[in-house]
Image (spheres, coloured by chain):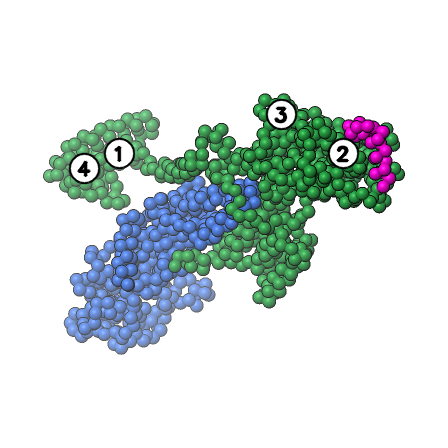
Chain colours: A blue, B green
Amino acid sequence: MTSLTGRWRERWKRWLDRRIPPAPQVTLNHKSIFILPTRTGFLFTLLLIVLLLTAINYQNSLIYGLTFWLFSVSLAAMMFTFRNLSGLTLAAGRAYPCFAGDVIELPLRLTAAKKRYHEALLLGFPDNPSQLTDVDTAQTRTLALSFRTAKRGPLQAERLRLDSRFPLGLFNTWTWVKLDFNALVYPRPETVPFVFASGEQGDQLIGAPSTVSGQQDFQGLRNYQPGDSMRQIAWKQLARGKGLVSKDFDHDEGATCWLDWDVLAPQTTEVRLSRLCGWVLQAHQLGWRYGLRLPGKDIAPDHSDGHRDRCLEALALHGFDGGER
Amino acid sequence: MSANRYSNTDLQIPRSALFWLLGSNVAALSPHSQHLPLWMWGLALFVLIWRGLTHLGRLSYPNRWAKAVAVVAASAAVIVAFDKTFTLESAAAFLIAACLLKLLEMRSRRDGYVVIFLGYFLLGTGFLFDQGLLTGLYGILTVWLLTSALVALHQNSFTRDAGSVRRSRRAAKLAAGILLMSLPLMLVLYLLFPRLAPLWSIALQSGKAKTGLSAEMAPGDIAELSQSDELAFRVSFSDGQIPARDQLYWRALILDNYDGRRWQPSGVTSEVQWYPQSWQPPAQAEGLIRYDIIQESTGEKWLFALRGVSAQEERTGMTMDDRLVARRPLHERKRYQALSWPSVSISEDGLAGLEQRQNLQLPRERNPQALAWAQQRLAEAGDDAAYINGLLRYFREQDFYYTLKPPVMGSEEIDDFLFNQRRGFCAHYAGALVFLARAAGIPARVVSGYQGGEWNATDGYLTVRQYDAHAWTEVWLSGQGWIRVDPTAAVAPQRIEFGLERAVAEEGTFLQDNLLSPHRFKGVSWLNQLRLQMDSLNYYWQLWVLSYDGKRQKSFLNGWLGLEDYKQGLYVLGGSFGGFFLLASLIVWWRQRPAPLSPFMRSWQRLQDKGRKLGIEPQPGETAANYLQRLAQHCPQQKSLLLWLATEINRLLYQPPPDPRSAQQQQRQLIRSLAKIRRQLRAG
């Protein structure tokens, strides 16, 4: 049974991919919009039947008129409901990276068609919270859609669903749009103690006062330099109005290490990447200079926010062809 | 899944929609005001105030107990108010009470749907009570309000301007747009949808007593009726001419049984011949009158017709005593045709035994003075006709008065009227004359109906109102058959010539109890003009809108569209539906057709097509220059040409010559080079 529904789902997905192909930007038209009556629509039909029977049995012209008018309204409602989506342009924005398992905020730009006011649009990814929004005539509105990520790598967002019952609620019109969000999902960080392999290749923490940890003593204050971590900034001084000053520690500065794929030898790829990810974050926080050694890719030791992001990106894209993007 | 998702996030009624919901429902209830008990308005006010306070956060929603108590109390109150009768009025009251209570407790959008759909239905049931022109216009307004409420119910309630006037105005505007757009299809359906006969007969009818003739007549009844200016029926004549006023006796009932106090139909002669088996006058007969009547609902089977009537329509028939009747009681307004031959003689060869006996029936033990007097007069007059004429002369010459305020008669009514009071209304005179005729052995009967009416010369129709109600007599003379005798004409000829108003002008009792009636002010010319114009508007409304039934539809299909039967009508109906959708999809297609490309873009695309064949796929977002460079690498022979083209294109795009003419020229040149290069393009 499940296999059957699974097969149908696959088929449905393939059909959707043909009909509404993934793109960075989609303008909705009759090809990508679906429409069906709602339960309220059926209730309305019941009302029409009762009215028609009353008109026939009492031979009442005005009730006939009312019935036919409401019937025509329900047909017009179909068109108006369709028009509420038709012409709307959805475009994917660039999202900040996140860690696998976290909720990523995906920016979505909605642009109204000419002379069209799109009202009460409900947007969201399946199994994720949805948002209700309006897009005014010739306006662009940007939303941040939440999507809970599952896997590391370039973001594989599902099709997002856009629903609307506006204006009369008799019909529901919807679309499934697949947008290419250019977002990266880092591996889920796993916090485990550092393991530095000994050897000549600089596989251990070099130049640190203690090989065990990054316990440091405060040394003094110095002027802020770009690249100093947030932890280093002397917030109290800043609050007193003395400008941006960094705390200088008798830190492991200069302590250099290599975070190596190979020391996590028996583990699976994903576990290794998770642990490496955790180490990168820790090492960055401790202020070390760290290098990353992955199969086929070495990143020389350094310390900066940019360096951290480079390392995380390398981890995220490990195994995906092309490596970097 | 999706449905749940939708309703979960937007369960509540948007705040701005509340006013629409309350307002539109009050609008839908208002036409029912005439038949609702007064406390219903109290309940409505109570609900509005409570709901308003809830909206402001001063009061909470009613809890479950309060709701249960309210439902029980309201139901009980309706049952008591309508005396446990189940009529249209009490059913409507139940529905309205339910709607009001729902307004109080509604919270979710689904409640909103229920309230709005109930509103539509209430509007429809309102039409069962009144279908006037103003009611129709008011109905349009109400449909608009209800539809606006439905739109407002779906507006986004999470935006900054939620609940602002601007948004409400948008809802109203959108609703108006939807309604206007659906008008054409509604008209097509109204004209073409088959008008069926009632599928089953409905027991649920209005319990309201209708003003109009009643099946029996006590002397005071018609005087009471004459205080009403309500419409009874309208007539138009097929030749556009109004017959002489003294011919306008609209017969409805034969009252041939007298119990000493009231006149009633005996039913002896009420056997019906239904159309088309009924009698038809010869086609070449002189003085035939064909007419078309729109009759207000009476709740009775009788129709109104002139003397010598012949049924002309399905479901109508004529009785043995020359009346027109319908198969079913008229609970709705009815339009029908009839043909009359006023000069025809009826039963001139003699009466059947039973009919003869019934039309001579008298309670012999009462009114002894009148009985004796009749015998004496008959002996003096010699023959029947002279006797009747003598009676009329007697009424005219003696001091008989025509009044709407007759004194109360004693127990011997006819005696008291003829010899003491001598003041009375048409019913008194008709009753007295029939009594005297029967006392003299001449078959006679009271006829009740309407006499005269107001002729609208511009639009050519006659309006007959309740105050035109009248009673007169028919006597049977051998050789002549039944002939009409109207004693009122002898006493007050103005009544017949000019109508009731003139007849009671001196007395000042015309519509005395109906102070605000516009008919009291016929003397004020502009007011009267206005009234007549309103009346003819209403007439056309009835003629074209309300009386559009199966028969009218058939003639419309036949005459206007040239269709022979329903089957063709259904084809047209289906065709117009198909046309509607075809047109809609054409419009959608036309709106979304790709914009035509400029000649330059077209030739550029052709170059790209060629490039594709050579395996150089254009990348999304790639500039023209970039693509040409890639192409140049692939085709070394044309390299210089391609690179030259790249710079030229860039120059045209980013550094166009200031005057448009040379820009155009440059563009044309470029198009030519593009075509040339395309032809030469070859992989290296």
**Mark 3 neighbour density, 10 Å: few (under 14) some (14–19) many (20 or more):** some
**Mark 4 neighbour density, 10 Å: few (under 14) some (14–19) many (20 or more):** some
- Whether residue B649 sits left or right of residue A236 in the image: it is left
Query: Disc 1 marks which residue?
Result: B602
Earlier residue among tags 4 and 3:
3
Which is more foreground, mark 2 or mark 3? 2
Residue type at tag 2 = Ile
In the rendered image, residues at marks 1 and 3 fall on the same chain: yes
In terms of secondary structure, where does tag 4 sit?
helix
Is there a contact, CB below 8 Å, between mark 4 and mark 3? no
Residue type at tag 4 = Lys
Q: CA distance from mark 4 to mark 2?
A: 114 Å
Earlier residue among tags 2 and 1:
2
Q: Name the foreground residue: B255 vs B350.
A: B350
Chain for numbered disc 1: B
**Mark 2 neighbour density, 10 Å: few (under 14) some (14–19) many (20 or more):** many
Viewport quadrant of the C terminus of chain B: top left
Is there a contact, CB below 8 Å, between mark 2 and mark 3? no
Query: Disc 3 marks which residue?
Result: B288
Query: Disc 2 marks which residue?
Result: B442
Q: Tell me the residue at 70%/42% (across/down).
A: B265
Earlier residue among tags 4 and 2:
2
Which is more foreground, mark 4 or mark 3? 3
The residue segment tinted magenta is B368-390
Earlier residue among tags 2 and 3:
3
